[in-house]
Amino acid sequence: MNKSRVMIMGAAGRDFHVFNTYFRNNPNYEVVAFTATQIPDIDGRKYPATLAGDLYPQGIPIESEDHLVDLIQKHNVNQVVLAYSDISHEDVMHKASSVLAAGADYRLIGPNNSMIKCAKPLISVCAVRTGCGKSQTTRAVGKALQEMGKKVVVIRHPMPYGDLSEQICQRFASYADLDLHKCTIEEREEYEPHIDNGIIVYAGVDYETIIRQAESEADVVLWDGGNNDFSFYNSDLHIVVVDPHRPGHEIAFHPGETNLRMADVIVINKMDTADPENVNIIRSNIEKLNPAAVIIEAASPVSVTEPEKIRGKRVLVIEDGPTLTHGYMTFGAGIVAAKKFGAGEIVEAKPFAVGTIKETYDKYTHLSVILPAMGYGEQQIKDMEETIRRADCDAIVSGTPIDLTRVLTIDKPVVRVNYDLQEIGKPTVKDVLAKFI
């Protein structure tokens, strides 16, 4: 029997997981390449033999998605598997059209063929889009479980942008671990808040290995999702966050709509800053697609420790990178804080951008005012520093969840913005968890 020749489209996350769980030891398929997008500089690498298994002693090349059609023809590909997240339904099918026109089948791998069972109770926190407020929701769930006396371990959606052979299974219990593993800004944004709360974080590439280690030191495992991807694990309780700042996106993006339909609990976040009409649109779509879900209403109020450094000042605002880029948001907590605490002017960042940061603005043309916190490698960090140095402003308002001064040399005062989930009325996160436990 001839093997089906497969190419997996991804962004250094679900693509590797789909390969590990479905294709790695499957004699009916030969994966000839991965393609990469969304994240800078992740193509041109190899998925190493140490991860690819006995069927792939040379590893598997990772190519740019820009060459998708040529690669299909070059490798005589029979099937192309889409395996990344936060992409509109329209774009999903545009990619399908390109694949079909090139002569290959187009495929998605679903939960039953990619989810792994955990030996301990597992709660997943996912979303319908990047930037909905997943992180503060996960923190709220983690704190509530700790208050119930449970030992919580978080497993974070993958961000393996370095040497994949060294990132098979990573454990983060301290800031020293972040330094040891040379974490990017994006990784630090997700790991540091959990570490601050005394919760161990696991991440990496091989999520079978990861779950077996994590469950050995946990009463409850908490899946902290990335983008709007669905969980890599079978969930005993599935919590999904929606964003009334982007009404309609919960049914227009892949695989966010999958999450909405699968959710046990739906958190309508950002109620404090949302238009009531947009909230009604969200509620209507939930009623149509998942009327049995429990709904929690919540806000994400912002606070700062030094408001006097904002009031009346000319400020440059930095926000979480993925939320602004492929999340397509035009503002975040930093902008909300700058306005709330009386900034004299929000300085446009784009004119000061250099190098890879300028390239980011060229690619994501909806951005101009805000500086996305890009930092996927040493060069991007240097370009971030130079962009900030050039900016004509009095202070920096940082809407990222981390202390940027630990990874960037910044020559201006930095005001950090804090934001946590704040439930409105009943039920609360604790109510839902009490029933679950």
Image (cartoon, helix red, strand yellow):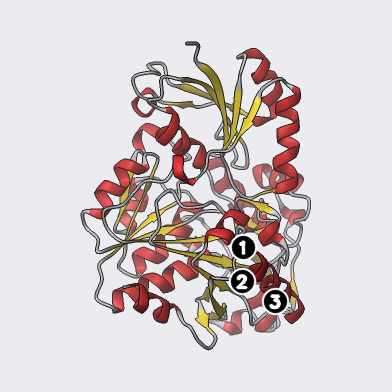
Measure the C-alpha gap from mark 3 to mark 2. 19 Å
Residue that appears at 63% across and 29% down: 64
Q: Residues within 10 Å of mark 1 (few under 14, many from 20)?
A: many
Q: Amino acid at mark 1?
A: Glu
Label 3 or label 2, whichever lies nearer to me, is: 3
189 on left or right of 282: left
The residue lying furthest to the top in this view is 1
Q: Residues within 10 Å of mark 2 (few under 14, many from 20)?
A: many
The residue lying furthest to the left in this view is 216
180 on left or right of 340: left
Measure the C-alpha gap from mark 1 to mark 3. 24 Å
In the displayed structure, 176 sits above or below 116; it is below
Q: Secondary structure at mark 1?
A: strand
What residue is shown with label 2?
333
Quadrant of the image occupied by residue 250? bottom right
The answer to which of marks 1 and 3 sits earlier in the sequence is 3
Q: Secondary structure at mark 3?
A: helix
147 on left or right of 137: left
| Pointer 1 with pointer 2, Cβ within 8 A | yes
Q: Secondary structure at mark 2?
A: helix
Q: Amino acid at mark 2?
A: Ala
Residue 319 marker? 1
Q: Can residue 395 be seen here?
A: no
- State the image coordinates of residue 425 (x, y, percent, origin top left): 53, 88
